[in-house]
Amino acid sequence: MDEFEYFSAVKLPKGTQLVMRLDGKSFHSITEKLGLQKPFDKRLSDMMAAAVARVMECNEFTIVFAYLQSDEISVAFKTGDLFKGRVEKLDSILSAYLSVEFNKELIQTGFGPLVDLHGLTPVFDARVIVLPTRELVKTYFQTRQENCKNNALHSYCYYSLRQTGHNQTQAEQILNEMKRDGKKEMLRVKFGIIFDEIPLWQRFGTVLYFELFTKQAVNQKTQEPVEVTRKRILIKEADDFLQDDSILSEILNHTYP
């Protein structure tokens, strides 16, 4: 029956850059049932970041950079040779790992009873993005951050309108006729919200990457004090540094031991 496994042999082209994007399935409905705040809830962002950090730290993957916005996660890999470049393996294993780690976070953060009450199964899908150059990897993340800013502005406007009596159709119709500056002005005048002052993680997203640091240790053979180099994951608000080619290049080009 192997001949019917049509896509099992699909592999990444040799020498390409591997990026993957994961999205939460039906997270709009799930977040409502969990009672999370709209348009943003820091608890959701923190749970997703913690789940991604554990995936980055496990030995299955070689992720060097991750970018989070809303229920979307994009990750860049050190190499495209993971699982011999097999697309089905990449999609299924990474989405499975992240889904498991996110559900662990839900339970540890106290959402377990609500998950059981509503019969929720939060999962992520995954897609492979094949980029021919490292320059396009930077462009990809810069594009996702622009998408984040647009989505954040739209979400603030949409939920502000909904909270003041507009139904879904009315809110969407109002926003479809407005440009970016008009939306910001509406938030300021009608709702007292200055968009450029909302938290950075909402406007620009969250990034995760490794940094090297030194620490004091003891040589187990000689019992003498030594200085060793280790790596750890940084989780931080993105601000607009993703638009700086030199900083993003430095992160993406690091090879960590």
Image (cartoon, rainbow, N blue to C red):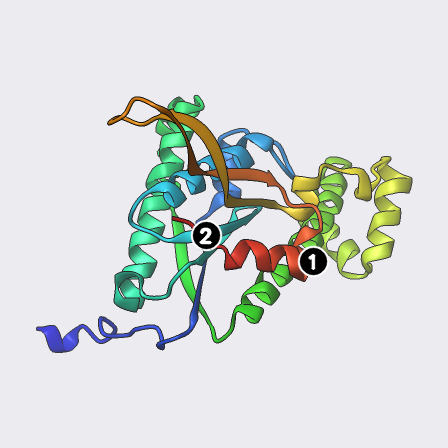
Q: Which residue is tagged 2? A: 64
Q: Amino acid at mark 2?
A: Val
Asked where in the image residue 165 lies, by quadrant, the reply is: top right
Query: Which residue is nearer to you in this view: 34 or 212?
Result: 212
* Label 1 vs 2, first from the N-terminus: 2
Residue 125: quadrant of the picture:
bottom left
Tell me if I can see residue 173 in this picture: yes
| Element assignment for label 2 | strand
Q: Residue at x 81, y 43 (%)?
A: 196
Residue 104 in percent (x, y) is at 36, 31
**Which percent across, then down, holds residue 78?**
41, 59
Residue on which disc 1 sits: 244
Q: Residue furthest left?
A: 1
Residue farthest to the right? 189
* Left or right: 213 as drawn, with respect to 224: right
Residue type at mark 1 is Asp
Dot 1: what SS?
loop
Taking the spot 52% from the left edge, 57% from the top edge, the residue there is 252
Q: For the point 55% across and 38% down, which residue is it?
A: 235
